[in-house]
Image (spheres, helix red, strand yellow):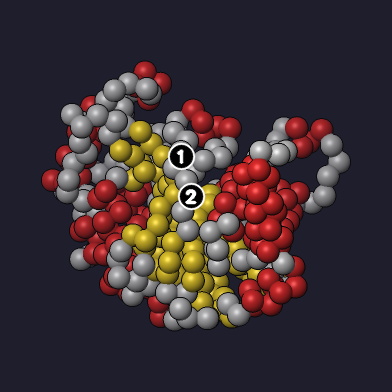
Amino acid sequence: MSRTVTIAVAQTIPVSQELDPPSDQMDNRGAFWAIDQNLLDTMRQVEEAATRKADVVHFPEFWLQDLVGQGRQVWLWVVAEKYKIAIVGSIACGQPSSPETPMPAESPFVHLLGGPPPKALTDAQQSWVEWVQHHLVDVEAKVGHAHYPQIHNTSVFIDDEGQVLGEYAKRNLWHPERDYFVRGRRQNQVFETKFGRVGLLICWDISHPSAGQELSDQGVDIVFVSAYWLATDSHPQLNNWRHVNDYEKTVVHSWMLARAIETESVWSLCNCGGDPMSGYMGGSGVWVPLRGNIGGIPGPGAGLRIMEIDMNVLQDTQKVYKIRDDYARYLKMVEAKEANGTK
């Protein structure tokens, strides 16, 4: 395992699909126009990060926008392998709830690897349009229906050979998400990479100490947190009280440092960027025990920041704080009491 890792935090401004988009922007391809823009921006960020010798490029929550099926994931595998760099980020990942309604097999985005987007729908895109029209035209009516896909907010880690090393379906859903996402139920598993043991969390997960503790118990070295966190997320109640400027960002950054120390591991946050008048705040960065915040993108604008971390800092961290040792000792004490039938 390499004791040095270089993380590229890519704070992007995802292009969203408007309900009634201008026809001059959309060509003849409907929602695929917005999706293509996000995928092309992803390729640009990956290429720059690879040129600057990063080991992994970290993207925000929902950075691709819209539902991601196998087609878009395959596209990411190819890009990671092409540029020899790992990719991590959160996507809305759908799976048919019934084997009778499989999603189209062919990727509708593979054309992007060979040139600019087409002016009209490709055959693969047309097959996806027909599938979506049949299965997702009325979300409220179809949620829970046997043919409606189960949609998870999923963080995925793809290594520099295009292999998916880890996935995590968000378990602590922010309140509005509960209307359309299914809560993840599988245990969050740490996995091995070239630069250490990695864990994945998403946005509101960091408000739950137990989410980080679960990863710490498995010996995690780096936790990647993808977020779509807005400065307005505590509204309207926040406005009832006098509060510090950048309150929401202060909360997020405080949690990031606290979780890094609690778990004696490196924590990387990639939040989305955007217009501050619409509530976007950015604030992506990396937090390391004994070092604090080592850099990032303080504002809401798009940007790519490269940060190198000497992972030997974690050895000193564990010598100083001994939090993992104390917790392991506590668990052994609890197990011993349970074995002896005492409380």
Residue 83 location in percent, x, y?
Answer: 32, 74
- Quadrant in which the C terminus is drawn: top right
Q: Residue at x 40, y 76 (%)?
A: 50
Left or right: 176 as drawn, with respect to 108:
right
The quadrant holding residue 101 is top left
Q: Which structural element holds mark 1?
A: loop
Point out the residue furthest to the right here: 242
Question: Residue 184 shows which numbered tag?
Answer: 1
Residue 199 location in percent, x, y?
Answer: 50, 58
Could you say which is closer to the camera, residue 332 or residue 303?
332
Give the residue pinned by disc 2. 188
Badge 1 vs badge 2, beta-carbon distance below 8 Å: yes
Residue 282 location in percent, x, y?
Answer: 61, 56
Question: Residue 271 shows which numbered tag?
Answer: none
- Quadrant in which the N terminus is drawn: bottom left
Could you say which is closer to the camera, residue 31 or residue 200?
200
Left or right: 144 as drawn, with respect to 205:
left
Point out the residue furthest to the left here: 123
Q: Residue at x 36, y 48 (%)?
A: 34
Q: Residue at x 53, y 59 (%)?
A: 218
